[in-house]
Image (tube, rainbow, N blue to C red):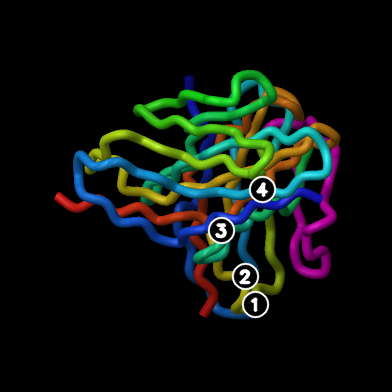
């Protein structure tokens, strides 16, 4: 079966610019996650969706980050405006349900100059 | 709240020798514990998981881990390292009340020929 797809794989922007990441989960997976992985650290959950509703966004910096999952399938994560400390790998994961194994995409590596 | 501590940030082994990656956890509820592997430019892959069944858990690629409640540990081992084992390894804990994943900082494994 096809895995979790993410694009772009790499992105370089200057601070204060905007950027968007796209994720296509495994078909049939109702739960979708966005993680931020800063160099040298483990991934940290930013937001969790169940179908097209937000389950947990307590760690999402809402003044600059936003995410949506229209129609309960694909999702986009946006940063506006970007800061230097946003440089990280952004991972998308999906699972059949909240208690099931999460499958991770390859990630998008963001560099903010 | 749950957390994990990976005791080694970097482990270097010779090909064919044993690998030991150490992990200690903290959890208020019945924990599930996982080991994930991340190869360069690849998504996170689940190696194995403990969910309150057998304390010795066997995973893919010859890895296994033992859950020791008295020591709050979940160390990962492999009897004979292969060059393809070079990667980043993450110990992860999840609690039964919310199933959210909390990642350790990771251990980088290098394998010498």
Q: Which residue carries the number 4 mark?
A: B25
What is the magenta range?
A: A50-73
Q: Position of residue A40 (x, y in %)?
A: 51, 65
Q: Secondary structure at mark 4?
A: strand
Q: Are marks 4 and 2 on the same chain?
A: no
Q: Which residue matches tag 2? A: A86
**Which residue is painted at 44% across and 47% down in the image?**
B21
Marker count (numbered)? 4
The residues tagged by marks 3 and 1 sit, at their Cα atoms, a distance apart of 23 Å
- Residue pictured at 36% horizontal, 49% vertical: B87
For marks 4 and 2, give the CA distance. 28 Å
Q: Nearer the viewer, residue A109 or B62?
A: B62
Viewer-nearest of labels 4 and 3? 4
Separation (CA) of disc 1 from disc 4? 32 Å
Residue A83 numbered tag: 1
What chain does mark 2 sit on? A
Circle 1 — which element?
loop
Q: Secondary structure at mark 2?
A: helix
Circle 2: is it few (<14), some (14-19), or many (20+) Cα within 10 Å?
some
Return the residue at label 3: B105
Among all residues in the image, which is located at the extreme left?
B113
Q: Residue at x 40, y 56 (%)?
A: B108
């Amino acid at each position: 079966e096809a895995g979790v797809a993410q694009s772009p794989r790499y992105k370089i922007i200057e601070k204060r610019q905007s950027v968007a990441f796209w994720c296509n989960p495994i078909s049939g997976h109702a739960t979708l996650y966005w993680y931020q992985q800063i160099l040298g650290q483990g991934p940290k959950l930013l937001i969790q969706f169940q179908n097209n509703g937000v389950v947990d966004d307590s760690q999402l910096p809402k003044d600059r980050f936003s995410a949506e999952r229209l129609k309960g399938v694909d999702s986009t994560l946006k940063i506006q405006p970007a800061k230097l400390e946003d440089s990280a790998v952004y991972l998308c994961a999906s699972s059949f349900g909240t208690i099931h194994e999460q499958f991770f995409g390859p990630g998008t590596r963001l560099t903010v100059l | 709240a749950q957390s994990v501590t990976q005791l080694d940030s970097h482990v270097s082994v010779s090909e064919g020798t044993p690998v030991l990656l150490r992990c200690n956890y903290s959890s208020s509820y019945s924990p599930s514990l996982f080991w994930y592997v991340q190869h360069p430019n690849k998504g996170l892959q689940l190696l194995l998981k403990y969910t309150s069944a057998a304390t010795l858990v066997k995973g893919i690629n010859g890895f296994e881990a033992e859950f020791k409640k008295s020591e709050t540990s979940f160390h990962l081992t492999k009897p004979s390292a292969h060059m393809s084992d070079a990667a980043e390894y993450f110990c992860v804990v999840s609690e039964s009340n919310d199933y959210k994943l909390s990642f350790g900082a990771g251990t980088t494994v290098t394998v010498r020929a």
